[in-house]
Image (cartoon, grey):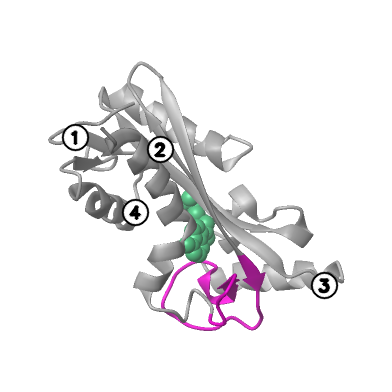
Amino acid sequence: MKLAGGSTLLVASHNPGKVREIAELLAAHGVGVHGAAELGLEEPEETGATFAENAALKARAAAAASGLVALADDSGLSVTALAGAPGIYSARWAGPKKDFAVAMARVERELQGKGARDPSAKFVCALALAAPSGETEIFEGEVHGRLVFPPRGDRGFGYDPIFVADGLHETFGEIEPTRKHAISHRARAFEKFARAVFAP
Ligand code: IMP
């Protein structure tokens, strides 16, 4: 799928932070953005078994309801010694109060419970671009690293304070946001997306 400058894309997210971040990335390509909340669209239930499936079902539902090309993302932390958990349940591990101190403590507890010595983990981001016809393309990005406890730094969000990317010593919660954005799973997925839809 190709997107022309001057076109408008629907970002299938009710998270204003996500919509803003995506709008900034797309503005550089002359593409405008609407958010799902702005158009009064409902959020579908995330019933997929993978990041890609969840991103695709959000993008397809939004494209079908709006008649616009829609972009959705689904992301999370995948811990090797926990067989990929929390994975697609990353947000849900934080509970109804979205408390990531609780979620990070659960990761630590589950690793200890398993006597796990392997601290390796990765963040994964799947972006899905869907047309109103249902045609869908997926772009995935990952950043590999290891987990550290206790959590360090208050600059990022979610699981950032326990994640140290390969080649770094500080957590994603400690480094400058611009450094994180240069290497993050989301940035890598976006690079693939931009190469596919904007390249001549
Ligand atoms: P989603 O909004 O359903 O895709 O949930 C993504 C969840 O994964 C977030 O709530 C965070 O817990 C976690 N997550 C995704 N990306 C990051 C990141 O860059 N840093 C820290 N946590 C992340």
Foreground residue, 162 or 194? 194
Callout 1 environment at 10 Å: few (<14), some (14 to 19), or many (20+)? some
Decide: is 133 above or below 3: above
Q: Residue at x 24, y 50 (%)?
A: 23
Residue 53 lies in quadrant? top right
Disc 1 is placed on an element classified as strand
Decide: is 122 above or below 193: below
Q: Which mark is residue 8?
A: 1
Q: What whole-number distance in Å separates the C-alpha atoms at marks 3 and 1?
A: 48 Å
Callout 4 environment at 10 Å: few (<14), some (14 to 19), or many (20+)? some
- Specify the segment rendered in magenta: 145-170
Disc 4 is placed on an element classified as helix
Q: Which of pointers 4 and 2 indicates the residue nearer the eye? A: 4
Q: Which of pointers 1 and 4 indicates the residue nearer the eye? A: 1
- Lower sequence index among marks 1 and 4: 1
The amino acid type of the residue labelled 2 equals: Glu
Q: Which mark is residue 75?
A: none
- The residue carrying mark 3 is 117
- Lower sequence index among marks 3 and 4: 4
Q: Which of pointers 2 and 1 indicates the residue nearer the eye? A: 1
**Farthest residue in the left direction?**
6
Q: Are marks 1 and 4 in contact (CB under 8 Å)?
A: no
CB at disc 4 and ligand 1 closer than 8 Å:
yes
Q: Residue at x 12, y 35 (%)?
A: 6
Disc 3 is placed on an element classified as loop
* Quarter containing the C terminus: top left
Q: x, y (%) of residue 16?
A: 29, 54
The amino acid type of the residue labelled 3 equals: Arg
Q: What whole-number distance in Å separates the C-alpha atoms at marks 2 and 1?
A: 20 Å
Q: What whole-number distance in Å separates the C-alpha atoms at marks 2 and 3?
A: 39 Å
